[in-house]
Amino acid sequence: MAGVSRIQYPANATPITVPCSGSISPMYILSAFNKGADGVLVSGCHLGDCHYIEGNYLARRKIQLVKELLEFVGVEPDRFRMSWVSAAEGAKYAEVIKDFVADLKPLGPQEKLKADRS
């Protein structure tokens, strides 16, 4: 809705659309950080309001595991966030992105993952 409504959000945010937040593999998130992303925001439907019945509950469980994994490999916890935003909430989505980008700025560029360090 944010794009259709032409609501502005930071140009350095790259949205990747998936059918459901529950379909996001932890490997996608790790790959983004490994390729140099300064932060990853996963956004899904509000709990109890999923087109795929329980996809957002599955996403919530995965996100908890991903947070632990990212901490283990050395990614600062503030570089990863989950938000619950309906597809009809374009303005809220843009605001969530703006807030996340603003929170990332003081952290500076992300360092390589521990697995890539020589």
Image (spheres, helix red, strand yellow):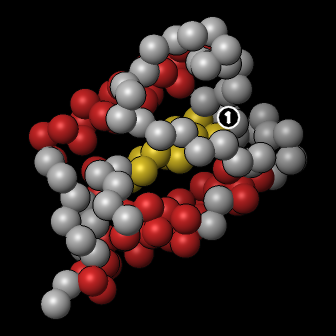
Q: Nearer the viewer, residue 48 or 55?
A: 55
Q: Point out residue 46 in the picture as x, y percentages from the top left corner.
A: 67, 34
Q: Nearer the viewer, residue 51 or 111?
A: 111
Q: Point out residue 9 in the picture as x, y percentages from the top left corner.
A: 42, 21
Q: The N terminus lies in which quarter of the figure?
A: top right
Which residue corresponds to the image point at 31% horizontal and 71% vertical from the top-left? 71
Q: Quadrant of residue 76?
A: bottom left
**Left or right of 53 on screen, residue 61:** left
Q: Residue furthest bottom?
A: 118
Q: Quadrant of residue 30?
A: bottom left
Relative height, residue 109 to residue 48 (above, below) = below
Q: The C terminus lies in which quarter of the figure?
A: bottom left
Relative height, residue 30 to residue 14 (above, below) = below
Whether residue 106 is visible here, answered yes or no, is yes
Relative height, residue 22 to residue 13 (above, below) = below
**Left or right of 49 on screen, residue 112:** left
Which residue corresponds to the image point at 32% horizontal and 61% vertical from the top-left? 36
Q: Point out residue 80 in the picture as x, y percentages from the top left corner.
A: 38, 53
Please count the marks in the image: 1
**Left or right of 64 on screen, residue 102:** left
**Left or right of 111 on screen, residue 58:** right
What amino acid is found at the position of numbered circle 1 in the picture? His
Which residue corresponds to the image point at 30% horizontal and 86% vertical from the top-left? 115
Which residue, given by chain and number where applicable, does mark 1 sit on? Answer: 46
Whether residue 64 is visible here, answered yes or no, is no
Q: Secondary structure at mark 1?
A: loop
Relative height, residue 57 to residue 111 (above, below) = above
Which residue corresponds to the image point at 70% horizontal and 48% vertical from the top-left? 18
**Crowding at label 1, few (<14), some or many (≥20) Cα neighbours within 10 Å?**
some
Q: Point out residue 15 in the picture as x, y percentages from the top left corner.
A: 54, 39
